[in-house]
Amino acid sequence: MADILIVDDDPQIRALLANSLGNHGYAIHTASGGREMDRILAHVAIDLILLDVMMPGEDGLSICRRLAAAGGPPVIMLSALGDEQDRILGLELGAGHYLRKPCSPREILAHVRAALRQRQTQAVTGRQQRFLFAGWRIDLASHELLDPAGVIVDLTDGEFAVLRAFVERPRRVLTREALLEASRGPDSESFDRAIDVQVSRLRRKLKAQNDEIIRTIRNEGYLFTPQVRAA
Amino acid sequence: MTLRPWRRDAPLFLRIFVWMLGGVAAVQLFSIAFLILLPGPELHVFTLDQVAAALGEGPLASELRLSDAEPEAVREQESLRSRRLRSKLATRLGVTEARVVLRREAPPGFLLMRPPSRQGGPLRLAPGARDARDELLFGDFVASLQLDDGGWRTVRPARSGSVEFWRWRALLWLLAATLAMAPIAWILSRRLALPIALFARAAERLGRDPRAEPLALEGPPEIAEAAAAFNEMQARLSRYVDDRAMLTAAIAHDLRTPLMRLSLRLEAAPEPLRTATEGDIRDMEAMIAAVLGFLRDLSSPLRRHPLDLRSLAESVTDGFADRGDPVILLAGDAVVVDGDTQALKALISNLVGNAVAYGGNAEVEIGSDEHQAWITVCDRGPGIPPETLERVFRPFFRLEQSRNRATGGVGLGLASARAVARAHGGDIILANRSGGGLVAHVTLPA
């Protein structure tokens, strides 16, 4: 039984969210702002926080930064702003997930489950966010890829998910199924293109000739050849 | 220096005035020093009698030199005065004019005259001479007499060329004066140009980031005033941006919060109602996103970073292609621009979306020359009436054909796209293609 804390200044949204998630068997706590959240965190072991960004008083971004610095529970951000910069900022500040309002109860539930599942794996692996490979630099939090000259190269969510899977498991043959599974992260949007297409697009964006960076292993899958270093 | 005590706050006008005055005074001092300190050109004046005496084996004036050199042939047309002088000389010597040759250098315009030498006796004008110049020889001359034996007797001033030498020295002196002035001119220009360059840099920075550091309010009053006005403008601009951001946030919050509640309440609703209402929520959300996106593109300070435009376009066109839309990106070289990834992606996405919705297809091409990068998005649809090519960029403007279609959005796509292009220092123009269709041409500074 996971304990979830909902932090939102709108009482109706708090009640509706509590009701919706409570129906799925989670223990729900609610807070109307940062101060109330701190009081609850002092008494209850919370597993996950659903955090509204735009609140009077201390805003969600500041709370998120504070929680991440203190090694607090994982955070799903709910933002009414919802533009790309807001999302990137939220993810950079340590939110594991970012949802734009309005979103359906189903989406919220999916992210809650994913976040709780990740919490267990991340406890083991730790969270490394920036990597270097073959002169390239990738930031998993801000979804940014820089080429050796420092120029931003844009990736779609699908391409980014595949690259992330490669970077997290370099120099290992990854099957198409493993890539598909790994890249079905909670951040990735619908991901229904064949892995081969994503890999070929990724190669094009990495300006890699043939097998230079991502090698095709016949009948097995793909191998990410460069050495990956934490940056 | 005299201006030191009030140098800090002296008006720019006064500073320039003083510097200019100082410069002119320095040059004048140089010139005066030249006139006073250095000897002027020496120009001797000889009477015809002196010359005739020298040629005719009479007493030789000390400043004349005698030789037996043969005169050079007179090349140029002999002037009237030379001719008159020669004829008088011949008369005095008692020979025919043909035996006398006289060559005179034109005297310089500016002379310091010396009285004629006294050695030849007092200066007398021959009776009948029209004026003194018919009896005198100024400056350099060469007078020759052919002797009875065919040899020559030539007389010329002992020190010739002094005028020419004086001329060159004066020229060098003026050149030196100019060179001596150069540092003053340099300092003056620098002092003038420095604040202006500072302004140019500040304005450039402001264009990129309205929250840039304000200018230092130092220097002469004119500069300080201009800097104050500039900083005031920057503050207003920054407030304006803040107001926009507040407005954006308020709209986002106040419109999306009820939608969020609605969305959560739908969980309990029966299936047909839920599906239909979720569709409505998506439509409203799309409109809110369009309006907010437009406001953001109009106002937000861009996060600029060098980026690969082609990878951006690939992401957009691949997305459309994945949904089955006939969108292609023509191959070409990598194009790097300094820009905001999300804003430029939205720009390309808007243009491609329009091309697909109204033209049925899209062909995207990217390139660059030394001045700018460009993106063209073409379709083979019906195009739009020429008189609306500019109007379609107005916010909420929609052509009738799009108002009646399910594809018609809020009417902010092109306005948004143009706002992004202009925020990057570029622009978008639309044109109908020959052979049908529409082309959107985006330029961005490289």
Image: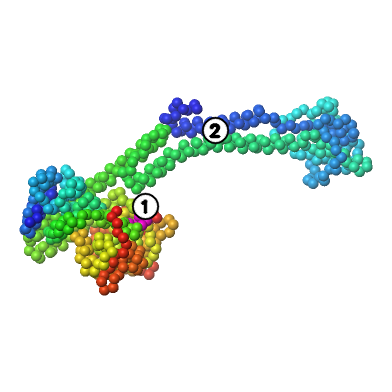
- Measure the alpha-carbon separation of dots 1 and 2: 43 Å
Of labels 1 and 2, earlier in sequence is 2
Which residue position is annotated with label 1?
Answer: B425
Q: Secondary structure at mark 2?
A: helix
In terms of image quadrants, where is residue B68?
top right
Which residue position is annotated with label 2?
Answer: B23
Q: Residue furthest right?
A: B149
- From this view, report whether residue B77 is shown above or below residue A226: above
The percent coordinates of residue B128 (x first, y second) are 84, 32
Residue at the location (49% across, 38% down)? B189
Q: Specify start and end residues of the magenta stretch as a single range.
A: A146-151
Residue at the location (81% across, 39% down)? B142
Residue at the location (59% across, 29% down)? B29
Q: Image check: B350 left or right of B273? A: right
Q: Residues within 10 Å of mark 2 (few under 14, many from 20)?
A: many
In terms of image quadrants, where is residue A196?
bottom left
For residue A137, the mark is none
Chain letter for the residue marked with disc 2 in the picture:
B
Q: Amino acid at mark 1?
A: Gly
* Main SS class of the magenta portion in the image: loop
Q: Secondary structure at mark 1?
A: loop
Chain letter for the residue marked with disc 1 in the picture:
B
